[in-house]
Amino acid sequence: MLSRSFLCRPALWLLMLGIILMLPSLLWGPGATHSHFYNILWTEHFGQQIAAGHPYQRWLPHSFEGIGSPTFYFYPPLVYLMSGSLNAAGFTALQSINLSALLMLSASGFSMHAFLSARGTRPLLGAALYMIAPYHLYDFYVRGALAEFGAFVWLPMIALAIDRLPTRRGVGLLAFACTGLVLTHLPAALLTGLFMIAPLTIWRIAQDRATLPAAALAGLIALGLAAFYLLPAMTLQNEISTNVLWTPRFSATAWSIWREDGLVFTAIALGTVLLAWPARSVWTGIAVFAALASVGLVPFLWEVDLLNKVQFPWRLLCVAEFATIVALMQCRPRPVPMTAAVLSLALAYVILIGVGHAMLLARPDYARLARTAPDAPEYLPRGIDPTLVSSFDRSVDLSAIRALPRGDEIVVQNAGPVTLGRAAFPIWRVTRDGRPVVTTGPLLHFQATPGRYQVERVLIWQEIAGTMISLFTVLLIAAEGLYRRLKVRRPPRLTRYASAHS
């Protein structure tokens, strides 16, 4: 029988809450969410590669009916490394997605509990509210945004680290948490940096000027640690079909509260504003601004090109919900705004339950997934015909190129142009007798003479340089830690002299 002390441990209660919240998906899901194809495809990819001894393979060879995709040169890998590891361990892709979501949901509660405990503001209640926050659950049950769902884990850690600046532990925790967020979800990292990290850091600098160099150091360390991913992602954009992504449909400026899907986000934003307002703290400012911006009520904000590229302004609800709960835990709720907030959030939960239930009942089209391996069309090679991408569901019609050869070797019988069924990307080199052959895209295309040609995988400078920067950063951290340990163990010079002459 479990002891009373064990039952009182917050981690157990939060884990139990996570299981309850995930129970519908654990029993019947995950369903046909907005991103379910990607979640399954990417989980299976990492599962296969990890099982084969390749823990971080950025190229997806089966995507787009076998022409391949450089997805993880651009998409942060951390969440799918986790789900893929579970898949490699023997769980099915769906089970791996569910277990990953359960781990991330519980971890978000643990990190929120740690942050609120350090502040002494009702940590268990706040952690539970953070886990059940409507957009938090909407991210998984409706949007299927598995990576953005994972971003919730890092926000409390970042806030705790900023509170601890300029101490060495604060710098280390901030660098670790920022690295984790970047490797989890890039748009969430950008929005968190601008709308949470920046104001909190400025607030801390006003209290202690030593915070500025400490925060800057943490940022540099985070960039160094994440360079193995960031450098290729930032420098290879011209090699893919980003024109398919930056369309009005996926533009933050095109969204408004009057759209058919705007009601749930508006209800969440209104509820967060009402809950956060009585606190009158820096957290109130962050929560209210993020909530209003998330539904497009901050003029001209999303017209900034960089912000417009986060696609959906409601992504800011991650920050708004976190800041709201922090603000709520440090003040006494007032009856009128609390009642109004509860009514607004109740509407959001009704929509979440209704739409989430429908998606659990709508089973994914596994036959289509196995047949075409549909990946995100922005990862198609540069120069692909954009009319091949459906405006309805973003599927790609590749029927015209299904007969093209896709192997690593081809024997050419007659001289002339040859096109392979493989997406052109700098990592691929066609050779004949060990000598490179000039190729063009969007599919590997070259002028051939009779003979045997090979397609070889090569490392590009972005992969090499990014990995070297990350390894160098790790070595610097390790060297600094070793130096401090040796310095602590080494007795002062005066003490050594006295001991030698005693």
Image (spheres, rainbow, N blue to C red):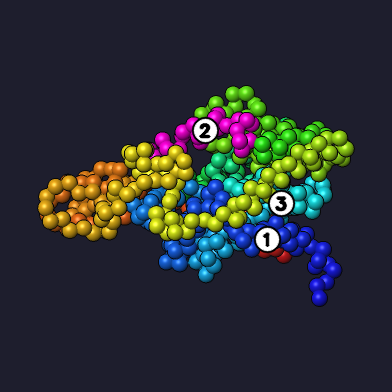
Residue denoted by label 3: 131
Judge whether 206 appears above or below 357 on screen: above
Residue 500, percent across and down? 67, 63
Residue 387, percent across and down? 36, 38
Q: Earlier in the sequence, mark 3 or mark 2?
A: 3
Residue denoted by label 1: 23
Residue drawn at (60%, 27%) of the image: 301
Q: Is mark 2 on a helix, strand or loop?
A: loop
Q: Is mark 3 on a helix, strand or loop?
A: helix
Contact flag, marks 2 and 1 (Cβ < 8 Å): no
Q: Quadrant of residue 299?
A: top right
| Residue 258 highlighted magenta (yes or no) | yes
Q: Which amino acid does label 1 sit on?
A: Leu
Q: Which mark is residue 251?
A: 2
- Which one is closest to the eye, mark 1 or mark 3? 1
Choose between 313 and 426: the one closer to the eye: 313
Q: Which stretch appears magenta? A: 236-262
Judge whether 199 appears above or below 101 on screen: above
Q: Position of 434 compared to 316: left or right?
A: left
Choose between 143 and 1: the one closer to the eye: 143
